[in-house]
Amino acid sequence: MPQSDFSFTIGQRLAETAAPTAAHTQANGGGFLGRTGTISTPHGQIQTPAFIAVGTKATVKAVLPEAMRDLGAQALLANAYHLYLQPGPEVLDAAGGLGRFMNWAGPTFTDSGGFQVMSLGSGFKKVINMDAVDQSGPDDQVAAGKERLAHVDDDGVWFKSHLNGDRHRFTPEVSMQVQHQLGADIMFAFDELTTLQNSRGYQEESLERTRRWAERCVTEHERLTAERSHRPYQALFGVIQGAQYEDLRRKASRDLGNMNFDGFGIGGALEKENLGTIVRWCNEELPENKPRHLLGISEPDDIFTAIENGADTFDCVSPTRVARNSAFYTPAGRKNLSNARFKKDFGPLVEGCDCYACANYTRAYIHHLHKAGEMVSHTLISIHNERFIVKLVDDARRAIADGTFFDFKAETLGRYYG
């Protein structure tokens, strides 16, 4: 298939530019997989490692695309499930694709919709404390007080819309058709999201189902690419599942690594303390010359862990989600602007921050907006939070290049969590 519009070039490797201490080396299994690189797409390049801001419904909540550009975001990720339900993929196709529809000129991602179908279907979150779950129970459990809205079979998933209860069917082929109409530069294969409450037996069954779905996604993607040659090439990433089982993660990485994917997403259920280990398992097996995207992280310690273990890009809704509850990031940790001590604080959210919110508004003013229920508070805090995470990853990328990554990590995390 024609892939001239998409490529990935590795720049510098972490192990070549830094001299980690013995403690670093021991903690990371004797080596590092981090690297810089460049992902080239029809709508521009992404310098990696990079944080990909989430615009679920073709918008980063409360923030204009122009503001995302100005704060340094390189690419945005939207959600196929939500856009399929509203306004419908045919609308974005007629508009010329996701980027044109939302007035974003840079690279775009769409996820397959699998996460929302499964998570909304069972009511469980992505991460479940395994100690609190009875894995001897049925594999089709739902969260307390929730109704099961999704039913998986070997061919695909039946699910009910969370908007109006209408019944819909997603298969690998449907996911590819929807995402081709959405028109993002990078899209993800349809996979089954399991949770940590599922038994080992079900994880094995699900992994094989996801493998077969991945093959079907590749076949349908190739057909649609040829059929829609008037559109720019869209890269397809396979998604690695396997929960917290090393053999399943490695098997999935080898299986999908041998398929005709342009890159890979690492998803699925895992606990925070196992993040680095699981990302490493996957990246030790995946092809080195293709990009790896870690789905759903943005906390500073997770970002450094992901980078060290070979993740090139990652996304999360957290910067805007916490902003709507008045939380903002600072080098000394996350603070809550609703606190009364900010009522007469006429300094910026963070002294020295170069974002629009910090350059023009005070903590006291944004505190007032939040207390008054004014939505502009969401906008200003979201701009700051997105800039904070984007800049953190940009600085980590530069630190890899200049050989100061481990010093930068120690200083940054020491201040943030100290």
Image (tube, helix red, strand yellow):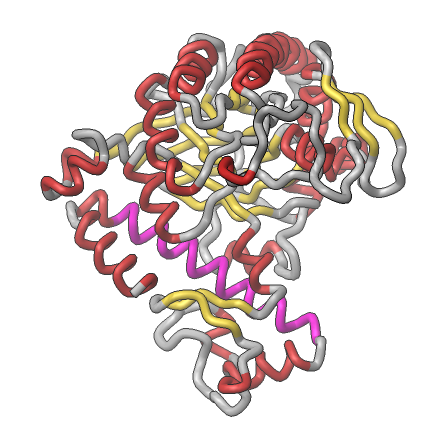
Magenta region: 374-398
- Residue 133 in sight from this viewpoint: yes
> Which residue is more in the foreground, 74 or 405?
405
The outermost residue toward the bottom is 344
Q: Position of residue 148 (x, y in %)?
A: 78, 32
Residue drawn where x is 77% and y is 33% of the image:
84
Q: Is residue 33 left or right of residue 321?
A: left
Image quadrant assignment for residue 283: top left
- Residue 81 in sight from this viewpoint: no
Magenta-drawn stretch contains 381: yes
> Which residue is more in the foreground, 61 or 26?
26
Residue drawn where x is 73% and y is 39% of the image:
82
Query: Looking at the picture, does residue 294 appear above or below residue 237?
Result: below
Q: Position of residue 228 (x, y in %)?
A: 68, 17
Magenta-drawn stretch contains 8: no
Q: Position of residue 86 (x, y in %)?
A: 80, 40
Q: Position of residue 165 (x, y in %)?
A: 88, 37
Query: Looking at the picture, does residue 317 appear above or below residue 32?
Result: below
Q: Is residue 275 left or right of residue 412?
A: right
